[in-house]
């Protein structure tokens, strides 16, 4: 996720220098400075913002290394799933300015969706800076209730994986009905991406857009009768989002 954000910032020419701590970067983005460990960061570095794009499982181990930046006035923007503002403050100090956000990977192409919550003590300028960083790679919404970030994580943070799975499943289903694999994959990708763009640009509800494709007694209706059955897609997604929300809360410890 951190690489996706950085790629988006560079593509959108966000001004400033970028210092990245990553022991084993799977790719290096041109123009950024990379360090194998936080101890390697320049001693005199005082960043305007520290973005914590760290997996929840190792978050508490690395957090103390960034305490010096929090005490120097840097705003901390955390995108770690499940890690609350209160728990981050315990690691950074009581005076730390913390914004917690949940973006998603389409940020890498400027089409991300992020929801953010500012902790106590975050000044307007710091909140605005975090907003600019998130808005540079997509849409941003702010919430006052931090608890909402758990279902946000389940819907939009993890959501791209659900969509990619849909592409996989749709392509495989096409192959089972006789389509060549390459053609079926192309159809699935184009259909999902095109439908998403239509939904984004349309003022109609998703239900109305669905109805516009569905003729009584037609092929789409036959498929929807399966997908909209009591144990169909809606019920499955409800269980999936509930499971992801539960796991996000568990990660908060």
Image: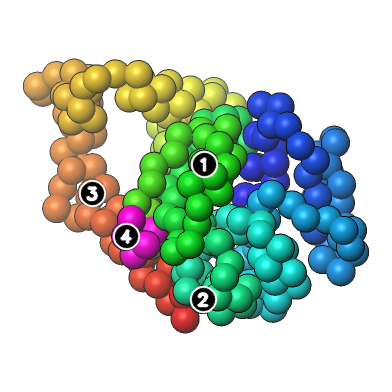
Residue denoted by label 4: 145
Residue on which the image places disc 1: 128
Left or right, residue 57 beside residue 218: right
Q: How packed is label 1: few (under 14 Cα within 10 Å), some, or many (20 or more)?
A: few
Q: Which residues are magenta?
A: 144-149
Up the image or down, 247 lies above or below 112; here it is below
Which label lies toward us, 2 or 1?
1
For the residues labelled 2 and 4, the Cα–Cα distance comes to 16 Å
Q: Mark 2 or mark 1: which comes first in sequence?
A: 2
Residue 147 figure quarter: bottom left
Per the image, the residue denoted by label 3 is 234
The residue that appears at 34% across and 51% down in the rendered structure is 143
Decide which of 165, 202 is in the foreground and name it. 202
The local secondary structure at tag 1 comes to helix
Q: Counting other residues with Cα less than 10 Å from the Cα at mark 3, is it few (<14), some (14-19), or many (20 or more)?
A: few
At mark 4, the secondary structure is: loop
Q: Nearer the viewer, residue 192 or 58?
A: 58
> Which color scheme does this rendered protein use?
rainbow
Query: Whole-Å distance between the Cαs marked 2 and 1?
Result: 23 Å
Residue 98 image offset from top left, x and y in percent? 54, 61
Question: Along the polypeptide, which appears first: circle 4 or circle 1?
Answer: 1
Percent coordinates x, y for residue 211 in the rendering: 16, 24
Quadrant of the image occupied by residue 201? top left
Label 4 neighbour load within 10 Å: few <14, some 14-19, many 20+: few
The residue where tag 2 is placed is: 87
Q: Earlier in the sequence, mark 2 or mark 4?
A: 2
């Amino acid at each position: 996720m951190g690489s996706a954000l950085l790629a988006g910032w560079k593509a959108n020419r966000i001004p400033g220098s970028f210092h990245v701590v990553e022991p084993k970067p799977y790719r290096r983005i041109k123009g950024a400075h990379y360090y194998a460990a936080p101890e390697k960061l320049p001693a005199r570095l005082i960043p305007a913002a520290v973005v914590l794009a760290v997996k929840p499982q190792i978050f508490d181990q690395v957090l103390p290394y960034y305490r010096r930046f929090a005490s120097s006035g840097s705003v901390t923007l955390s995108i770690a799933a499940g890690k609350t503002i209160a728990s981050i403050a315990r690691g950074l100090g009581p005076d730390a300015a913390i914004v917690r956000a949940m973006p998603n990977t389409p940020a890498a192409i400027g089409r991300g969706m992020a929801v953010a919550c500012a902790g106590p003590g975050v000044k307007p300028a710091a909140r605005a800076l975090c907003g600019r960083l998130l808005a540079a790679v997509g849409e941003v919404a702010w919430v006052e209730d931090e608890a909402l970030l758990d279902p946000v994580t389940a819907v939009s943070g993890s959501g791209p994986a659900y969509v990619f799975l849909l592409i996989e499943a749709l392509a495989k289903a096409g192959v089972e009905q006789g389509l060549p694999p390459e053609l079926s994959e192309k159809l699935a990708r184009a259909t999902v991406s095109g439908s998403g763009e239509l939904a984004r640009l349309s003022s109609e509800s998703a239900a109305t857009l669905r109805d516009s494709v569905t003729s009584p007694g037609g092929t789409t209706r036959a498929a929807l009768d399966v997908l909209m059955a009591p144990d169909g897609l809606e019920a499955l997604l409800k269980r999936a989002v509930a499971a992801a929300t539960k796991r996000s809360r568990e990660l908060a410890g």
